[in-house]
Image: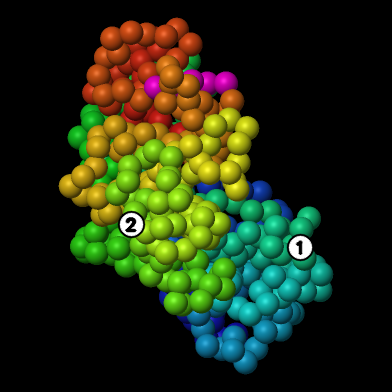
Amino acid sequence: MLETFFRTHQYLVERIQAPVRRALMDEINWRDRLIGIKGSRGVGKTTFLLQYAKENFGPYDRRCLYINMNNFFFQGKTLFQFALEFMRGGGLVLLIDQVFKQPDWSHELRLIYDRCPHLHVIFTGSSVMRLKEENPELNGIVVSYNLRGFSFREYLNIQCGLSLRPYGISEILNRHERISDEILSQVDPLPHFHDFVRHGYFPFYLDHGDFSETLLKTMNMMIEVDILLIKQIELKYLTKIKKLLYLLAVSGTGAPNVSQLASDMQTSRATVMNYIKYLSDARLINMVYRHGEFFPKKPGRLYMHNTNLMYVMTPDGMQEQDMLETFFQNALWGRHEVSMGDRSSTFLVDGKLRFRIVTEEPKRRNTEVVYARSDIRKGSNQEIPIWMYGFLY
């Protein structure tokens, strides 16, 4: 039974060409027995699994096996039965891609955890999945990580053949002039930054096809599969969710007018808010609140999840300020709490750091605000080039 899977595993691992080593690879505690890698469609989850297999086992070591739940084999065999046979044959690490395609997947993972004590399972899933909240069987046993699209740092390393390292937010705030010198001695970031915001976040830009068309297909799959299938929403509501995404994209980055959106979509305010949450879970948009406020309250601002999405949704009507704010909040998303700022700042980060996103030298400076500028290669004092925040991971 396993031979076909081993042959596929060998073929894929031998041929995997990971353009850059993702920072997440060194952040995961690989000793945990059940690890979930979540991420939006197109960010490279499959490549990440295969890269792990290649680095740690190679293509011919039968202790590690990659499987994809798209395989029709699993229509007649449970995941637990497969894992048990793999473990009995000496298997140690089972890599499961798209685990949500398996019916009752959380129960199957629990069985594997309880009855295959020598087996480590690493699985990928959609960002829409709420591993612990919606699957109580996995509480206390699964460790979840988020794989994001390329950072600006990773993009630079790929494009220029460099090995630039990431920096923490405190390093950037305290050492940004020295960091700029280190980076500028190797590359001029600004021309690459303008390319990155258009097409650098999603790894499939490397495929040299029509990036915009591929991204549009990916976005449709996020809605049609990741939202409708996983959230079990009827197909007849598909057009409403797509229309909502479009309306949010073209309305800018302010607070959504939920009543107007409900009227435009001919649905209720509650339904609009639920759909906004689904779009956020799918990482098509980000909701930014005032510090201390959370869903189900209406967000104070809405952004597309990353700038690449902006360029395919609103290629002609996009404001540079909106694009820069979208880049900044995406760069900090997932590791820092990004809230709305006050009159003097655009964002409040981690409840204490105030940032203002600007396109030129500020006419008036507030000593308690850090200015992220788009027009400079190197900053000074409280002014830091905005591209540097792309080095946070």
> What residue type is disc 1 on?
Pro
Q: Identify residue for label 1.
A: 136
Residue shown at 26% from the left, 54% from the top: 312
Q: Is residue 354 magenta?
A: yes
Q: Is residue 62 magenta?
A: no
Q: Earlier in the sequence, mark 1 or mark 2?
A: 1
Q: Which residues are magenta?
A: 352-356
Residue 89 in picture, x, y percent from top left = 70, 80
Q: Residues within 10 Å of mark 1 (few under 14, many from 20)?
A: few
Q: Secondary structure at mark 1?
A: helix
Tell me the colour scheme of the image.
Answer: rainbow
Relative to 167, 1 lies left or right: right
Q: Nearer the viewer, mark 1 or mark 2?
A: 2
Residue 44 in picture, x, y percent from top left = 43, 59
Magenta segment, prevailing SS (helix, strand or loop): strand
Q: Residues within 10 Å of mark 2 (few under 14, many from 20)?
A: few
Residue shown at 57% from the left, 73% from the top: 232
Residue 288 in picture, x, y percent from top left = 49, 38
Could you say which disc has been placed on residue 246 in the image? 2
Establish if 377 lies above or below 146.
above
Observer-nearest of 196 and 369: 369
Residue 36 in picture, x, y percent from top left = 62, 59
